[in-house]
Amino acid sequence: MKTINTRFGEVEYDPSHVIHFPEGLIGLDQLKHFLVMPNQKQGPLFWIQSVDDPAFAFVVTDPTNFFPDYAVLPDAEERRKLEIDENGTCFVLAIVTVSQNKEITLNLSGPILYAPETKKGLQVVLEDPRYDIRTPLPKVE
């Protein structure tokens, strides 16, 4: 077990549970190792915490909780980077942002692909005009 000091306090973790992002995240390519932080509250949001720089942590979610038709499938090159084949499990996550006026948005144009079998992650850029880096949550009627 290893320990890091984070905004959540001292966190003990098993290095075998670390998610490795070989290319880092967009704009943060130096951050390559993350932990999934246990969710303290019920709900669809959770944190990923950088092991490389404990000052960085992000809220993420499964975007299909809010956008049921949202679907991203890794292409051959992305599967190679994730070290999975066509049948390998791949989860899609979106980074969540809360603005100063409390508007919650999801980065649907830059989702994170995560392969649990290999513990590899990859952030990709979608060329789809329907999605934005700050896509507001759908209005509840």
Image: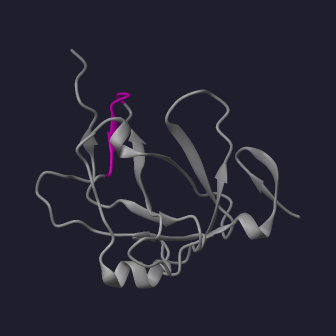
Question: Range of the magenta residues?
Answer: 101-107
Q: Residue at x 55, y 77 (%)?
A: 30
Q: Nearer the viewer, residue 61 or 101?
A: 61
- In this view, the residue farthest toward the right is 1
Q: Quadrant for residue 3, please give it.
A: bottom right
Q: Front-most of 128 and 57?
A: 128
Residue 119 x, y percent position in the rendering? 60, 70
58 or 60, which is in the foreground? 60
Residue 5 magenta-drawn? no
Residue at the extreme top: 141
Quarter assignment of residue 16: bottom right
From the top left corner, tell me how far across and down residue 118 is, in percent.
59, 74
Q: Residue furthest front?
A: 87
In the displayed structure image, the side of residue 124 where residue 81 appears, left or right: right
Q: Quadrant of the N terminus?
A: bottom right
Residue drawn 67% across the image and 32% down it: 40
In-front residue for pair 91/3? 91
Residue at 53% x, 29% y: name it: 43
Which picture quadrant has residue 53?
A: bottom right
State how many labels appear: 0
Q: Residue at x 73, y 44 (%)?
A: 8
Residue 77 vs residue 7: left or right? left
Q: Quadrant of the C terminus?
A: top left
Q: How is the image coloured?
A: one colour
Q: Percent position (x, y) of residue 42?
A: 59, 27
